[in-house]
Image (cartoon, grey):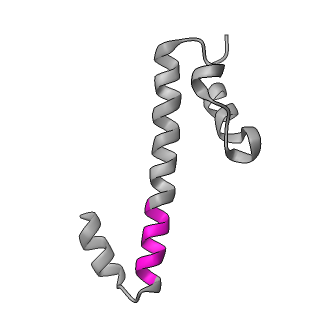
Amino acid sequence: MRTVEEMLDELENANGGEGPDPVATVDDPALARVAVAHMRARAAEHTLDDAVMAAREAGRSWQAIGDVLGMTR
């Protein structure tokens, strides 16, 4: 049986990083949920990265961006 790390690695690296459908490739419902949550977290990280870059390109400061994110130095 493959480990969760092996399955997540497969998901991350398959199809040029797109990954296969985790529900179709993982036959354990609990692990499929983990895979789906991981993929959603990665998508959210990419969305956040894009939003931060757009804010910077629009001239917003790192301080203003950090304030919105609840981050401090």
Point out residue 45 in the picture as x, y percentages from the top left corner.
47, 54
Residue 63 x, y percent position in the rendering: 30, 80
Q: Quadrant of residue 70?
A: bottom left
Look at the picture and state if 28 lies above or below 68: above
Q: Residue at x 29, y 65 (%)?
A: 69
Let me know if residue 11 appears in the view. Answer: yes
Q: Position of residue 3 (x, y in %)?
A: 62, 19
Total marks shown come to 0
**Could you tell me which quadrant the C terminus lies in?**
bottom left
Q: Look at the image and tell me whether residue 73 can be seen.
A: no
Asked if residue 52 is among those painted magenta in the image, a careful observer would answer yes
Is residue 19 shown left or right of residue 48? Answer: right
**Dominant SS type (magenta):** helix
Q: Which residues are magenta?
A: 48-56
**Which quarter of the rendering shows the N terminus?**
top right
Horizontal side, residue 66 vs residue 35: left or right: left
Q: Is residue 60 above or below residue 68?
A: below
Is residue 29 rendered to the left or right of residue 25?
left
Q: Nearer the viewer, residue 18 or 69?
A: 18
**Quick check: 2 above or below 56?**
above
Query: Does the segment drawn in magenta span residue 53?
Result: yes
